[in-house]
Image (cartoon, rainbow, N blue to C red):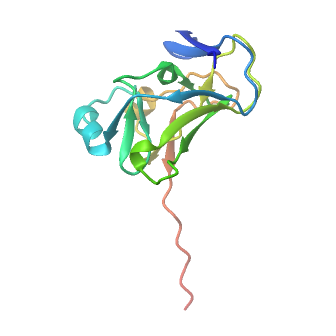
């Protein structure tokens, strides 16, 4: 299958990925590739780095795809608050977590020349500090832009016990 995307400079952030031909809604655009590593391995290597830039994609409870190593063009797809793509983790049919994969799929028709984006869906326990807000600032320019790639997980509310 010929590729319909290319990496080039982005107005959103540094590098981006752009359609070189029309992409249909529901079409698989690219698989996110990189070195398969455990959460502990990436925490050990990158845990003390606080630069708001990552090519890590959580695959499952055990593994992460580290696109810093053997990554492909998918690592350059920027975050967007009104994305035109969505990332899916596809579990291996045999249940082997090492064989799970991530694919990026078009959520709507994408025109030639349009930049591809997806919601990074990065959750943290709140609140977001000023430093985190600056490091993880969103520059997508969408009318509904939240200004941050981070989403705060709020604690579940408990129901009052009946007396």
Q: Determine the residue positioned at 57% across, 16% down.
A: 17
Q: Determine the residue positioned at 37% across, 44% down.
A: 63
Q: Position of residue 54 (x, y in %)?
A: 39, 28
Query: For residue 144, which quarter of the picture?
Result: top right
Q: Nearer the viewer, residue 51 or 163?
A: 51
Whether residue 9 is visible:
no
Q: Determine the residue positioned at 72% across, 34% down.
A: 26
Q: Determine the residue positioned at 54% across, 15% down.
A: 16
Q: Give the side of residue 117 with respect to residue 51, left or right.
A: right
Task: Name, please, the residue furthest toward the top.
Answer: 9
Q: Position of residue 120 (x, y in %)?
A: 53, 35
Q: Position of residue 50 (x, y in %)?
A: 31, 30
In the figure, 109 relative to 21: above or below?
below
In the figure, 162 relative to 61: above or below?
below
Q: Position of residue 96 (x, y in %)?
A: 42, 50
Q: Nearer the viewer, residue 52 or 84?
A: 84
Task: Name, please, the residue furthest toward the bottom.
Answer: 163
In the figure, 121 relative to 126: above or below?
above
Whether residue 25 is visible:
yes
Q: Nearer the viewer, residue 117 or 22?
A: 22
In the rendered picture of this protein, how many numbered marks are placed on residues? 0
Instruction: State the quadrant of the C terminus.
Output: bottom right
């Amino acid at each position: 299958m010929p590729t319909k995307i290319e990496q080039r400079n982005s107005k959103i952030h540094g590098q981006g990925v752009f359609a070189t031909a029309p992409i249909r809604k529901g079409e698989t655009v690219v698989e996110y590739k990189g070195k398969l590593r455990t959460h502990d391995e990436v925490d050990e290597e990158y845990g003390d780095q606080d630069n708001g830039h990552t090519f890590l994609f959580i695959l499952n409870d055990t593994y992460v795809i580290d696109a810093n190593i053997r990554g492909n063009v998918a690592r350059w797809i920027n975050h967007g608050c009104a994305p035109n793509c969505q990332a899916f983790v596809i579990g291996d049919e045999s249940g082997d977590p090492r064989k799970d994969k991530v694919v990026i799929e078009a959520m709507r028709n994408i025109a030639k020349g349009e930049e591809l984006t997806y919601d990074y869906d990065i959750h943290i326990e709140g609140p977001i500090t000023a430093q985190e807000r600056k490091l993880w600032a969103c520059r997508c320019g969408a009318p509904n832009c939240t200004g941050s790639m981070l989403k705060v997980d709020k604690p579940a509310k408990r129901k009052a016990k009946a007396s």
